Image (cartoon, rainbow, N blue to C red):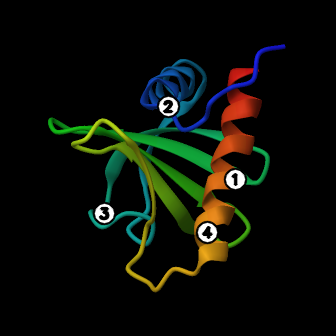
């Protein structure tokens, strides 16, 4: 079986398409997104809600830890065409936090695209 490079921008597009095809349309709660009632398509994978949000500028994936009901991180493609995996809320990040987001993203990508 081929190994998935979960940090390629094309992978984000594949995840977004999978969530659109298999997820449910919903409005995200105000504590999850800045703007109350933001439309998204979401899919549950393990203990995470993987939600896609699209606007004119870009598509963003929000990965929400269901156990805590707080978004863990967002994934999008930046202006340099690189995958950006960042903390959702403004906070000081440790190396462990950054690595945990990367590991979680790769685990989710593997489960979604297998």
Dot 1: element: helix
The x, y position of residue 102, in whole percent, is 62, 54
The x, y position of residue 73, in whole percent, is 51, 61
Residue under label 1: 104
Dot 3: element: loop
The answer to which quarter of the image holds residue 2 is: top right
The answer to which quarter of the image holds residue 19 is: top right
Q: Quadrant of the C terminus?
A: top right
Query: Tag 3: Cα neighbours inside 10 Å, few (<14), some, or many (≥20)?
Result: few
Residue under label 4: 69
Q: Residue at x 37, y 40 (%)?
A: 82
Dot 2: element: loop
Looking at the image, residue 40 lies above or below residue 90: above
Of the numbered discs 1 and 4, the one sitting upstream in the chain is 4
Q: Residue at x 16, y 39 (%)?
A: 57
Residue under label 3: 36
Residue under label 2: 8
The label number, if any, that marks residue 68 in the structure image: none
Q: CA distance from mark 3 to mark 4?
A: 15 Å
Looking at the image, residue 75 lies above or below residue 86: above
* Marks 1 and 2 in Cβ contact (< 8 Å): no
Q: Residue at x 58, y 81 (%)?
A: 94
Dot 4: element: loop
């Amino acid at each position: 079986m081929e190994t998935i490079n979960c940090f390629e921008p094309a992978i984000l597009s594949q995840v977004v398409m999978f969530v659109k095809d298999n997820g449910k349309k919903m409005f995200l709660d105000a504590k999850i997104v800045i703007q109350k009632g933001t439309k998204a398509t979401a899919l549950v994978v393990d203990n995470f809600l993987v939600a896609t949000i699209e606007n004119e500028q870009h598509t963003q994936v929000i990965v929400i830890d269901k156990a805590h009901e707080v978004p863990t991180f967002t994934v999008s493609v930046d202006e340099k065409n690189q995958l950006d995996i960042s903390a959702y809320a403004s906070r000081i990040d440790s190396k462990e936090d950054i690595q945990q987001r990367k590991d979680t993203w790769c685990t989710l990508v593997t489960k979604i695209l297998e």
